[in-house]
């Protein structure tokens, strides 16, 4: 480039210089060739010599090669066979190695299929786990392994579905068998309770043996026999009674739980199980509408509930986590509230005390059974106290009917006893003591009627019936004693009192029956202390205890007696009114018949015979009845005279009326009932006597002169009464003496009557103004 850059014609100069340079190099090459030419010639000469030897060697080599080829063909064939065998051997070894890896996989998969066929699903899951974790990774490059891997999830789902189906079958099975499971558990609890009671009695006997050795040996041997029989009976029952595990196969639950746990879905299974069991609990707790009609309905209801919770308790103790104590407690509290509500409702429909008592016994066994499984049952025993009140109500209704039947069947006459044996029979039924009656010879009569011992027996039967409910309530003797006394008080103060009141008010109960009722209530009242002793004996609680309630029978029988007494007074008055209504006076008669009216004599005879029946009554009752009857008779006679419908009364009628009042006074003075002092009973007729005397004597001057004075002879005669009667006589005189006005004496008498009438009116007006 420097040549081209210098000057023009540089190219030519360059070429010239290049040619000069070439010529120099040619000269150098020629010199070198000339220097080495001899050596080259020598080498060619030696090479030509060697060529001949090389031709010989080539022929020899060719021949040797031919001969070697001929000799090596067989070796090659053998070598190729060896190589082929070696390849086969290597392949076989490889196949064996691979088969050794695959065979355990295939064996495990075959085992898995077999386990699936025989429904050993838990083992199948374990086999799957081994396949996935241990065997399949070793041969994962093979296609059949991929197929296996794809099938394993499907098999797991199949196992889950099958186990879930088994669980559903199990749930259906325990739903069907829960009543029998519960019945079995309740029988076992009842047997255990019976055994404990027998054992306790045996211990008491053994304790008493130390006090009375000789007698104790006999008692011990007898009780050992009894206890042995009890054991034998229990053993027989135990052989017959099946357990929950015998009735229901729980293996589906265990399998399903294990399967879901292995699959990692344990929580899903727990939730499903608990949800299904809650649904079953609601079904079990739903009673039949007719459950209250029979005890079997209640027994089936309780058996199903017990069976349900026995199964839950079994699941709680044989599994871990499927059922927890918190879950069972929550489920039990829900069930308990429902049970109490159901029993409250259905027990309220029960009207038969025997059914209520059987219901109570079932509730006690039900509570004891579940308490044995660890469930709290205090609320059930509280419910029993509510049912006890209802039981008492049903008892009261039943005994009300019994009392009514007894009263209806009673003849209301003293009990006749012909001999000592009959007397002892009555005394054995009713605590009767009467030293005076004991002195009398047979035959004789007890003062009470047949209803008294029957009522007394029924009251004791009621106490026994009430006691039956109090048993097994886990209450002290003091509480039981208090309950018995309260229920007995209700029987006496409400039921028996009501029956007595209704009996007394019945229209067919006459005076004789009322008298007998009073006597009966007196003896029943005296027997109340024996009823208290009876309750104390069966409860072993002394009446001296501070908290012991008293029976209110005294007040009950006193009230009934007072009602009977009042009814006696009422019926006596009604009977008197009936006699008064048949009175037939001729108020215009000119003179009396000279003898008392027939109706009045019949009335007095009736009263006399009636008061003779009253001899067995307390003195005050008979006296009050007699005084009440006389006062009512006096008032009725007075009202007859003053009746507004009666317009005229003649003096003859007054005289006849006076004869009747005299008979009344004679009856009163004859002391029909002992105990009256002086003429107390006669004072019942004092108003009538003074009024009649005033008109009979015609002593108006004395009456008017002494009116208002305490010493007046006619103090009990009211001016208005005298005026009413006098006006009736005045009208009668005017009607009957139309022509008598021309006789001077009659005119004077008429004027006197008018004068007296005016004076009496002035007295009446003065009294009204003063008032």
Image: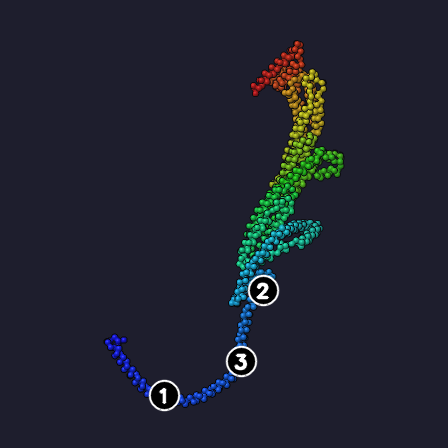
Judge left or right: residue 126 versus residue 442. Answer: left
Check the image and report above or below for 46 versus 528: below
Q: Is residue 220 visible?
A: no
What is the spatial separation of the Cα atoms under label 1 and label 3, in whole angstroms? 52 Å
Mark in the foreground, 2 or 1? 1
Mark 3 crowd level (few <14, some 14–19, many ≥20, 10 Å Cα): few
Q: Secondary structure at mark 2?
A: helix
On the rendered image, what quadrant is the C terminus found in?
top right
Mark 2 crowd level (few <14, some 14–19, many ≥20, 10 Å Cα): some
Residue 444 occupies which quadrant of the picture? Answer: top right
Q: Position of residue 695 (x, y in %)?
A: 66, 16
Q: Secondary structure at mark 1?
A: helix
Q: Is residue 622 visible?
A: yes
Q: How is the image coloured?
A: rainbow
Q: Position of residue 115 (x, y in %)?
A: 59, 62
Q: Position of residue 673 (x, y in %)?
A: 69, 27
How many tags in the picture?
3
Mark positioned earlier in the residue sequence (1 or 3): 1
Check the image and report above or below for 132 versus 184: below
Q: Position of residue 62 (x, y in %)?
A: 47, 86
Mark in the foreground, 2 or 3? 3
**Contact between labelled residues 3 and 1, with CB atoms less than 8 Å apart:** no
* View extreme (left): residue: 7
**Residue under label 2:** 111
Residue 410 occupies which quadrant of the picture? Answer: top right
Q: Which circle marks residue 78 in the picture?
A: 3
Check the image and report above or below for 768 versus 121: above
Mark 1 crowd level (few <14, some 14–19, many ≥20, 10 Å Cα): few
**Residue under label 1:** 40
Judge left or right: residue 452 versus residue 149. Answer: right
On the rendered image, what quadrant is the N terminus found in?
bottom left
């Amino acid at each position: 480039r420097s040549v081209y850059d210098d000057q023009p014609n540089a190219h030519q100069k360059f070429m010239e210089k290049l040619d000069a340079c070439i010529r120099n190099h040619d000269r150098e090459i020629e010199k070198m060739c000339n220097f080495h030419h001899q050596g080259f010639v020598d080498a060619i000469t030696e090479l030509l010599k060697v060529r001949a030897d090389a031709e010989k060697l080539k022929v020899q080599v060719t021949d040797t090669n031919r001969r070697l080829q001929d000799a090596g063909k067989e070796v090659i064939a053998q070598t190729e066979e060896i190589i082929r065998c070696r390849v086969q051997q290597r392949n076989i070894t490889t196949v064996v190695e691979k088969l050794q890896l695959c065979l355990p996989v295939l064996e495990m998969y075959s085992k898995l299929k077999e386990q699936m066929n025989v429904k050993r699903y838990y083992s199948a899951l374990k086999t799957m786990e081994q396949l996935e974790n241990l065997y399949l990774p070793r041969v994962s490059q093979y296609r059949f392994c991929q197929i296996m891997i794809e099938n394993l999830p499907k098999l797991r789902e199949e196992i889950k579905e099958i186990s879930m189906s088994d669980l559903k079958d199990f749930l259906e099975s325990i739903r069907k068998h829960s009543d029998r499971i519960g019945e079995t558990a309740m029988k076992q609890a009842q047997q255990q309770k019976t055994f404990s009671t027998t054992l306790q009695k045996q211990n008491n006997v053994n304790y008493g043996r130390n006090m009375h050795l000789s007698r104790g040996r006999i008692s011990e041997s007898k009780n050992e026999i009894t206890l042995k029989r009890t054991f034998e009976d229990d053993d027989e029952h135990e052989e017959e009674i099946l357990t929950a595990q015998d009735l229901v196969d729980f293996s589906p639950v265990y399998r399903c739980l294990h399967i879901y746990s292995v699959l990692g879905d344990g929580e899903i299974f727990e939730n499903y199980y608990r949800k299904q069991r809650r649904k079953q609990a609601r079904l079990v707790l739903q009673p039949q509408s007719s459950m209250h009609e029979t005890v079997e309905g209640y027994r089936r209801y309780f058996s199903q509930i017990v069976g349900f919770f026995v199964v839950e308790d079994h699941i709680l103790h044989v599994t871990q986590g499927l059922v927890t104590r918190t879950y069972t407690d929550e489920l039990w509290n829900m069930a308990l509230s429902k049970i109490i509500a159901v029993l409250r409702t259905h027990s309220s429909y029960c009207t038969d005390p025997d059914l209520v008592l059987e219901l109570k016994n079932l509730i006690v066994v039900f509570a004891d059974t579940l308490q044995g499984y660890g469930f709290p049952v205090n609320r059930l025993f509280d419910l029993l106290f509510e049912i006890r009140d209802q039981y008492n109500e049903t008892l009261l209704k039943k005994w009300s009917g019994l009392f009514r039947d007894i009263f209806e069947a009673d003849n209301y006459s003293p009990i006749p006893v012909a001999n000592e044996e009959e007397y002892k029979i009555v005394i054995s039924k009713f605590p009767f003591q009467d030293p005076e009656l004991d002195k009398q010879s047979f035959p004789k009569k007890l003062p009470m009627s047949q209803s008294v011992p029957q009522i007394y027996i029924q009251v004791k039967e009621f106490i026994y019936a009430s006691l039956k409910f109090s048993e097994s309530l886990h209450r002290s003797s003091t509480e039981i004693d208090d309950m018995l006394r309260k229920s007995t008080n209700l029987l006496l103060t409400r039921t028996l009192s009501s029956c007595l009141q209704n009996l007394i008010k019945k229209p067919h109960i006459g005076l004789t029956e009322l008298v007998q009722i009073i006597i009966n209530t007196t003896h029943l009242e005296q027997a109340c202390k024996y009823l208290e002793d009876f309750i104390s004996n069966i409860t072993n609680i002394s009446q001296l205890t501070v908290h012991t309630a008293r029976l209110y029978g005294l007040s009950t029988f006193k009230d009934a007696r007072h009602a009977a007494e009042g009814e006696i007074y009422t019926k006596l008055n009604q009977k008197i009114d009936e006699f008064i209504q048949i009175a037939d006076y001729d108020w215009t008669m000119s003179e009396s018949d000279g003898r008392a009216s027939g109706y009045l004599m019949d009335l007095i005879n009736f009263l006399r015979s009636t008061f003779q029946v009253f001899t067995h009554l307390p003195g005050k009752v008979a006296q009050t009845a007699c005084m009440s009857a006389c006062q009512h008779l006096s008032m009725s006679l007075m009202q007859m005279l003053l009746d507004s419908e009666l317009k005229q009364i003649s003096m003859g009628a007054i005289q006849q009326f006076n004869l009747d009042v005299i008979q009344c006074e004679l009856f009163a003075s004859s002391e029909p009932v002992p105990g009256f002092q002086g003429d107390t009973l006669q004072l019942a007729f004092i108003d009538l006597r003074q009024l009649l005397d005033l008109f009979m004597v015609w002593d108006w001057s004395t009456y008017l002169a002494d009116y208002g004075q305490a010493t007046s002879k006619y103090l009990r005669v009211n001016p208005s009464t005298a005026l009413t009667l006098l006006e009736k006589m005045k009208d009668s005189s005017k009607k009957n003496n139309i022509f008598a006005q021309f006789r001077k004496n009659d005119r004077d008498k008429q004027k006197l009557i008018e004068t007296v009438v005016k004076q009496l009116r002035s007295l009446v007006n003065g009294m009204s103004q003063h008032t």
